[in-house]
Image (cartoon, grey):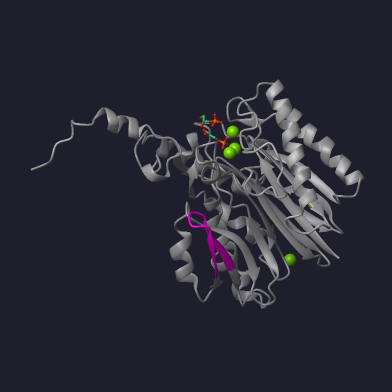
Amino acid sequence: MKTTISVIKADVGSVAGHGIAHPALLAKCEEILAKAKEEELLTDYYITNCGDDTELIMTHKQGEENKEIHELAFNAFMEATAIAKDLKLYGAGQDLLSDTFSGNIKGMGHGVAEMEFKERPSDPVVVFCCDKTEPGAFNLPIFRMFADPFNTAGLVIDPSLHNGYKFEIFDVMEHKKVIMNCPEEMYDALALLGSISRYVIKRVIRKDDNEIAAAISTERLNLMAGSYVGKDDPVAIVRSQSGFPAAGEVVEPFAFPHLVGGWMRGSHNGPLMPVGQKNAYPVRFDGPPRVMALGFQIADGELVGPADMFDDPAYDPARKQAAEIADYMRRHGPFEPHRLPADEMEYTSLPGVMEKLEGRFEDID
Ligand code: 13P
Ligand code: 13P
Ligand code: MG
Ligand code: MG
Ligand code: MG
Ligand code: MG
Ligand code: MG
């Protein structure tokens, strides 16, 4: 019998501004998921939040893209939205693009990462949750986990990893996907993955036996909604140990707080700061962007844990560096590369400014 892990998330309201999800929202989700567990639709669940995004981490036997599981999450977020509206939380129902469920939660504004596998004798899984950034934020760390031997020693020294992994890469602009093999096609894969707002890793699969290794939520809210309704704030599920990178190799890339798109008004580059749950609350200039890592052991579908993996003093230097980079980037004010290039900005006053200047632009001799 296989186990499915579904992580479904949405921002349905926060305190103050785009800060942190209110506990009443998590309590409502808890009530709904507890009932689903009692009715044996879910095997287990864990509810958390990264900043203003609420994450439902669920295990079950229904497989990926299951209507009942998606509807359960949809309903939980709808009911949480009703509370958010009562409390006049900021951005009540922000990510929900539709109030009627159509059979699959994809395309409705939520972020979704799911994987189904046959449990090993021991199955460690890490769930990453981000706030104030976009799915491409995972390109660099996921690539490093599964393809960079300077990150993952196992790629070199462990025969069970040595053959490498396949990366399923989505072109989110053209709605196309391609599967690329690493290490053979590493340079070609990086040519795509460096363009983080367009090419995003959806899945990683072990080449030896096609076993699922990682799944990432790739939904781009502004592309679905046609306008800015907040950043996507993605999640990822990564399996570790015994044929996968060790848990420590899975969290290692985040010791480098790389620059990602998001932060204030979804329109700025800033460092991705790895944080424990207690600090998953972006404040300064609505950031800097955050990522937290929850480690579980999956035991017959039960979620044993979590371990709050970035709540580790060894990540203090990364947090300090992220704070310093945040300072440095902020000093650019409205200038690139702090502010995103015009075509990637979620907000722009440029058309209005250009309209005002119509007739005042002259040819340069
Ligand atoms: P969220 O996507 O986290 O709601 O952020 C929106 C925003 O504009 C922050 O400044
Ligand atoms: P809403 O789209 O949720 O109103 O947020 C916009 C925003 O970016 C405020 O900083
Ligand atoms: Mg928000
Ligand atoms: Mg958010
Ligand atoms: Mg968001
Ligand atoms: Mg070991
Ligand atoms: Mg534990």
Which of the image's four quarters has the C terminus? top left
Image location of residue 118, percent across then percent down: 80, 66
Q: Residue at x 53, y 36 (%)?
A: 287
Q: Nearer the viewer, residue 131 or 56?
A: 56
Image location of residue 307, percent across then percent down: 75, 48
Residue 66 occupies quadrant: bottom right
Q: How many numbered marks have been drawn onto this rendered protein structure?
A: 0
Point out the stretch of residues depicted in magenta.
167-179
Q: Is residue 154 above or below residue 340?
A: below
Image location of residue 21, percent across then percent down: 67, 32
Q: Is residue 190 above or below residue 322?
A: below
Residue 176 magenta: yes
Q: Is residue 288 left or right of 249 when viewed as pictured? A: left
Write down which quadrant ligand 6 falls in.
Answer: bottom right
Chief secondary structure of the magenta portion: strand
Which of the image's four quarters has the N terminus? bottom right
Q: Is residue 181 above or below residue 137?
A: below
Q: Is residue 304 left or right of 362 when viewed as pictured? A: right
Q: Is residue 215 left or right of 36 when viewed as pictured? A: left
Q: Nearer the viewer, residue 17 or 315?
A: 17
Residue 241 occupies quadrant: bottom right
Question: In the rendered image, is residue 108 in sight?
Answer: yes
Q: Residue at x 28, y 31 (%)?
A: 355
Q: Residue at x 76, y 38 (%)?
A: 75
Q: Is residue 180 above or below residue 100?
A: below
Question: In the rendered image, is residue 341 in sight?
Answer: no
Image location of residue 99, percent across then percent down: 68, 36
Residue 158 magenta: no
Q: Nearer the viewer, residue 157 or 354?
A: 354
